[in-house]
Amino acid sequence: MSNTPNNLIYILLKNRRFIIKVLTVVMLLTVGGSYLLPNKYTVTTVILPPEEQASPALSFGGLSLGEFAGFFSGGMGYSLPLMTTLADVYSDILNSRTLIDQVILSTAYIDSAGFSERYENQPEVAMYLARKQFRRNYSATVTSSGFIKINVTTGNPMYSVEVSERVVFLLDSINTSITMARYITSRESTENQLSVASAELDNTTEKLLHFEEEYGTIMPNDELSQVMTVLAEMKGRYIETTMMANAVRNGIRSGTTAQILELDATAEALRQSIDLIENGSSSGGVDLGIGLGNLPPAMIEYARLQTDFEMQLKMTTAFELRVQQALIQESSITSSLRILDPPRDPGWKSKPKRLYIWIELFLITSVVLIAFLYSREKWYELKVENPETWNKWNNVKQDIRNDFRRKKK
C-alpha cells in the first residue's frame, strides 16, 4: 500500500462512479426541492434623512426663545446624544416593539401567518411568534448616506406593499405625536415662566410706584442716565452669559468644562459689578467711571428699579409672543417624512434564489464527499500498513460497545 500513489486525485478517480452517483442524487433532490419552496417578495422603501421640525423663533440675548424658556424651566430643551442623528432615532422607532406590534395588529399579520387559529386560547404566544417571524422578514437600517431603508418580505407582493405603507404611516404618526408632546411641554413651560415673569413685573412695578409716591418722579440727569445704561447692558450680558452656561451644562449646546467655568466666572463678575452699582458703594477699589460717590442713594435705587422694570417687561413680552408662537406650532404640525422610494410592487420574487441554492449544495456535497473518501482511504491504509494501531482502535471500539451493552442490562 505504501507504493500506491495515495493522493487526493487518485482517490477521486478511483471513486469516480460513487461520486457521480451521489452528486446526481443530491442535485436532483435539491433542484426538485427548490421548486417546492414558496416565493417571497421584498418591498424596499427609502426615506430621506429626516429634518427636525422647526419654525422661525424669536431670539433673546443671542439665543432662541425656545432655549431661553428651557433654561428657566430647569433644562427642558431637547438634544440628542453625541454622534446620534435623527435618522438613528427613526431607525430605533422603526425597530421598536411598539411599532412592530401595531403593524402586526393592524395588518392581520397573525392571521396570515396562521398563528391566530393555532393559539386561539393563547394570544400572547401567538403575538410572540408573529413578532418573531415578522422580525425575520423585516429590516429598518440607516445607510452610510443617512437614508433610512425599510425592507418588508412576505409571500404576496401586494401584502408586502400594504405592510410597508403601514410601517411608514405609523412612523409618521409616532413622530407627529412625539413632536406634539414636545410642543405641548415647551408651551406649558413657557406659560409657567410667563406667569413667573408677570409676577416679577407686577412686583417691580409696585415697588417703582411706591418709590415714586415717596420720592416723586426723578428726572434722570447725565450721571443717572449713565448708571441706567450701564445697568441695563450689564444685566443683559449677565442673563445671556448665565443662559449660555446653562445651555452648555445641560447639553443643549456643545462646549467644554473650561468654557463652562469661564462663563460662570464672567457671570459672577457681572453680578458683583451689578451689586456694586445698585448698592451705591465704590469699596474694593473698583472704578466704574460714573462717579457713584456723587450720586444720592435714592437715584441709585431708582436706576435699579427702572432697569429691572425694563428688563422684566422685555422678558414678559417675549414670553407672551412665545406662547402665541407655540399655539401656532401645535395647530400646524405637518408630516416631516420625505419618501424617496415609496412602497411599490417589486415585480419579481426575491426568494428563493434557486441558482445560489444549487451551487451551495453542490459545493457542500463535494467537500463532504472528498473528506469522507479521503478519511476512508486513510482508515484502510492504517488497517493494512499498521495492524498494531488498528488493533488498538478496534479494542477501544469494542470497549465502547460493551459500555452501552452494560447500560442496557
Image: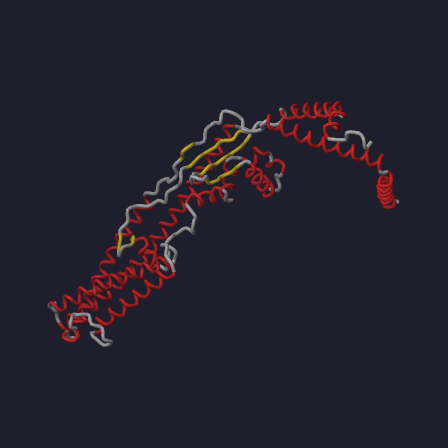
Front position in the image: 306 or 210: 306
Q: Residue at x 35, y 61 (%)?
A: 260
Is residue 403 placed above or below 26 in the rendered structure?
A: below
Q: In this view, does 27 lie to the left or right of 405?
A: left
Front position in the image: 39 or 181: 39
Quadrant in the picture for the N terminus: top right
Q: Which residue is drawn at 52% across and 25% down?
A: 348
- Asked which quadrant contains residue 22, the reply is top right
Where residue 224 appears, as percent x and y from the top left, is 14, 68
Quadrant in the picture for the C terminus: top right
How many numbered markers are drawn?
A: 0
Front position in the image: 57 or 201: 57
- Asked which quadrant contains residue 279, the reply is bottom left
Where residue 77 appears, as percent x and y from the top left, is 37, 54
Q: Is residue 87 left or right of residue 9?
A: left
Where residue 236 appears, as percent x and y from the top left, is 24, 61
Q: Which residue is drawn at 35% across and 40% down?
A: 334
Q: Which residue is drawn at 72% across and 33% down?
A: 371
Is residue 178 placed above or below 213 in the rendered structure?
A: above
- Asked which quadrant contains residue 366, the reply is top right
Where residue 187 appears, as percent x and y from the top left, is 33, 52
Which colour assignment does the render follow?
Answer: secondary structure
Is residue 86 placed above or below 112 in the rendered structure?
A: below
Q: In this view, does 398 lie to the left or right of 18?
A: right
